[in-house]
Image (cartoon, rainbow, N blue to C red):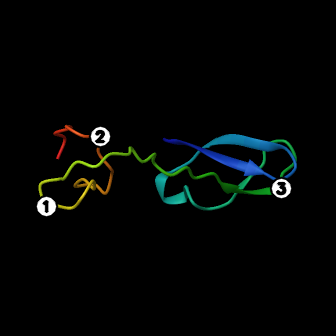
């Protein structure tokens, strides 16, 4: 099963092994028992100005920006 990060307002972050279907459900902090929300981190954006195969300036097939000269899309 996957491991997800949660953040307790009292104790800080902790990890919990949960089913994918339960990943966004609040988890109980192992130290104090308080309900904690999942920590989500967005994917980084790589700057650049190359054109993708669809002709959009700098945006690739997965919505990511490209560094000039990349050929991933």
Q: Earlier in the sequence, mark 1 or mark 2?
A: 1
State the CA–CA distance, disc 1 to disc 2.
16 Å
Sort mark 1 into few (<14), some (14-19) or many (20+) by Cα contacts within 10 Å. Answer: few
Q: Is residue 11 left or right of residue 28?
A: right
Q: Secondary structure at mark 2?
A: loop
Q: Secondary structure at mark 1?
A: loop
Q: Secondary structure at mark 3?
A: loop
Label disc, if present, on residue 6 of the rendered structure: none
Q: Is residue 43 left or right of residue 38?
A: left
Label disc, if present, on residue 67 of the rendered structure: 2
Q: Earlier in the sequence, mark 2 or mark 3?
A: 3
- Image location (x, y in percent) of residue 1: 48, 41
Sort mark 3 into few (<14), some (14-19) or many (20+) by Cα contacts within 10 Å. Answer: some
Q: Name the residue carrying label 1.
A: 54
- Image location (x, y in percent) of residue 32: 87, 47
- Seen in the picture, residue 15 relative to 20 is either above or below; the reply is above
Residue toward you, 52 or 29: 52
Sort mark 2 into few (<14), some (14-19) or many (20+) by Cα contacts within 10 Å. Answer: some
Q: Name the residue carrying label 3.
A: 34
């Amino acid at each position: 099963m996957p491991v997800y990060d949660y953040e307790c307002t009292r104790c800080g972050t902790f990890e919990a092994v949960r089913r994918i279907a339960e990943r966004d459900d609040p988890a109980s902090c192992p130290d104090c028992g308080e309900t904690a929300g999942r920590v989500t981190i967005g994917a980084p954006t790589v700057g650049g100005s190359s054109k993708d195969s669809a002709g959009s300036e700098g945006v690739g097939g997965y919505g990511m920006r490209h560094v000039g000269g990349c050929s991933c899309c």
